Amino acid sequence: LEQRHHQKSLDLATRTSIVEAEAWVDDHTVPLDTELVAIGDAVGRVLAQEAVAAIDFPFFDQAAIDGLAIHVDDAAGASTYNPLVLEQGTVDGPLLPTFGVAVSVGDRLPADAEAILPIGQFEARPGGRYEVIEAAVPGSGITPKGSHFVKGTRLLGIGQRPAARHVGILLAAGLSEVQVVRRPVVRCLLLARSEPLGDQNGPMLTALVDRDGGLMADMGSTARDQATLCAALSSAAAEPDVILVVGGTGQGSDDASAAALAEAGELAAHGIALAPGETAGYGLSRNGVPVFLLPGSPTSCLWAYELLAGRAIRRLGGRGPAPAYPVRQMTTARKIVSAIGTTEICPMRRLDHDRAEPIVSYMEGGLGTVARADGFVIVPEGSEGYPAGAIVRVHLYEDFDWAS
Amino acid sequence: LEQRHHQKSLDLATRTSIVEAEAWVDDHTVPLDTELVAIGDAVGRVLAQEAVAAIDFPFFDQAAIDGLAIHVDDAAGASTYNPLVLEQGTVDGPLLPTFGVAVSVGDRLPADAEAILPIGQFEARPGGRYEVIEAAVPGSGITPKGSHFVKGTRLLGIGQRPAARHVGILLAAGLSEVQVVRRPVVRCLLLARSEPLGDQNGPMLTALVDRDGGLMADMGSTARDQATLCAALSSAAAEPDVILVVGGTGQGSDDASAAALAEAGELAAHGIALAPGETAGYGLSRNGVPVFLLPGSPTSCLWAYELLAGRAIRRLGGRGPAPAYPVRQMTTARKIVSAIGTTEICPMRRLDHDRAEPIVSYMEGGLGTVARADGFVIVPEGSEGYPAGAIVRVHLYEDFDWAS
């Protein structure tokens, strides 16, 4: 009987297309349940309900300028040659005719005030009086109640992420808390390997999960054998929303992650037509939690995360499915070469505002390419690349200088 | 004797230009001292030193594929008709001729290995032997030591902010910590006011400071009178890097922030040719800490922060001075109107990929405009705006969908 080198768990001749893999992710992820957070903690979170103004803003007729609140008739005909005298009133209670009340920007106006005279159009006089030296137009200097927005105005929509600048408006709208999508909880199992440098994938994945709105709740090392890994995947510990298994995805004799997932749950795919990342896989734990098998090679781990595991985390958290990089139509200054049948991530260097060129591939340049790339082009599996001069969609890294 | 309405602390006829104000900020802010942080904590921080590889990567000749490490001569002439037999060697010690060692992606190669035969080009046989059925090219299947980057390679430069994807490469380069610029510590004094809705500026500024890399270390309310405010500004409490005073900047009778700063330190300017934000001011505390006087009106507070206080915080933290929004050349679909002599922030709504239009101004629309704008155009004080069809520089909010 012929004995093979080892049990071959990965057949690269029958890889799953990235389109199919993304569809699987989309089929197995919907936004999680919601939680109530204070407005100050809502920055960057995903709104699970519309932010609707609970009150008018301003909440009252408000002084738009520093000045004197008056009845318009009391200033009619006023000039430096015909100064009109008003008594000093109080902000409480209605403003009576022939009285004026000094107000500052933002102050609630006394009831019945019709206009604010700006500084310079009146003078304070001894004995608690004001001398008015210009006429006023009704409503001038006043920000009317509800003029910025009225109760019921939709300020932010479902799925929007409040930014720092929105904090003021949400509070002003009478909201103290908002419903946001719960952050996906992620568990990561690193398959142990004798690495003189230690592990790079764990800290990188922690940062990527955080960037995508998830919470890396548990990061542990486990032995590489199928039995140990299967037990870890079946563990009754607090159930996460996504499980990442890093390493053990290849054709080597100690690559058991796919077999372990098949035993501990359901292996949906192993081997993706994606470069880097072709030994990745995915499936479900026995409890239906999506499990992503990420290659141990750092660049493959990065890209399998970006396109598959990250997509799940982003969708569970209510974000858009694609990696959160701005996209720009640019001209490629050199030919981009890609293998038919594989979705390839082609790293790009930006040359100027509208031009970029491919640099040494992730396969060849590894982590060095990660440092050198300004962005990337995703070449679909049906394409063999693009000629020099073609317009391509470049995903640019978010820390890139956009100024033009 | 003529008694004026009140001491007029703000003369809007002699406002400081934004160019002069920015120059003052730049003259009074340089990047702070540095601190050492672990790589996992360096994401988003500003590098204060180059990140230079401490070792070659890979650190050893590494298996690029799963397969069999061999001497090339031992496979010369091999084919299915002429299988060559190798003994099973071990990964420790040099690889001897006529031996083969099974390796997985990422493994350190046994010394003297010359190539890796991929799965399918050899078969394991009983008795610890391999049958080789294809020849091998020297170096095939091997990622040579240092081929991704060599010791001394500059991976990231001073001022760059490591992203999640850089965590792996920095760790792989043998770095466990990096020097980053210390986060600017900010103290905020809110001038108390009887607001039925409470304060919106404090939480908004906390979020803005965090966005710009600062730490809001202290947020307190203080009475509006000059003596109390002066005492608060002179407080010997832990010295921050920037002080924000919110409110009390106008021409009203209870507007004492500028006078208090003049007494407690040095008032450099009060009244800026900026809309919104014209009552803002700035100066130095007695200890030389930059103090920004921000208007209490939320939109004026926001824009005085964005252009002046935020600029100081960003510069102290080693970031670029401008608000961190991507800029895009777009066509304005409608005329943009601005007053000569004032730098105006014109809110814009994006219409499509390359077109935007002005919406109701911040002065008129207040916080409602903050929710409705997709970005803004800064119209310099020398300009009275742009005609419909003009190309303008639109700062787009970072959470905007860039896909095109």
Image (cartoon, coloured by chain):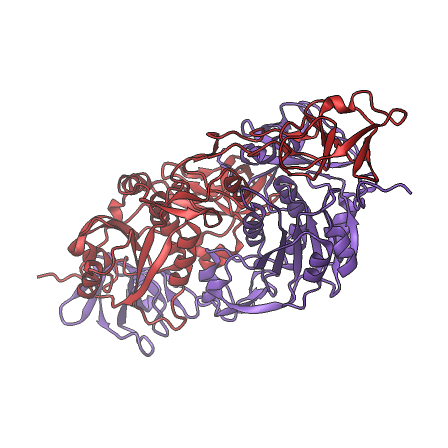
Chain colours: A purple, B red
Give the position of the N terminus of chain A as an image quadrant.
top right
Q: Residue furthest bottom?
A: A93
Q: Residue furthest front?
A: B127
Image point (40%, 68%), residue name: A61
Of B400 and B73, nearer the camera is B73
Q: Tell me residue A209's x, y (percent).
A: 58, 53
Left/right of residue B330 with respect to residue A267 in the rendered view: left
Total number of numbered labels?
0
Q: Tell me residue A308's x, y (percent).
A: 69, 49
Q: Tell me residue B273's x, y (percent).
A: 32, 45
Of A397 and B170, nearer the camera is B170
Of B257 and A246, nearer the camera is A246
Of A189 and B232, nearer the camera is A189
Can you say whether B223 is above or below A244 in the image? below
Q: Is residue A147 visible?
A: no
Image point (56%, 66%), residue name: A52
Q: Quadrant of residue B320?
A: top left
Can you say whether B102 is above or below B248 in the image? above
Q: Tell me residue B383's x, y (percent).
A: 40, 37
Left/right of residue A337 with respect to residue B219 in the rendered view: right
Q: Residue furthest left?
A: B1
Can you say whether B179 is above or below A283 in the image? above
Q: Is residue B401 visible?
A: yes
Image point (41%, 50%), residue name: B213
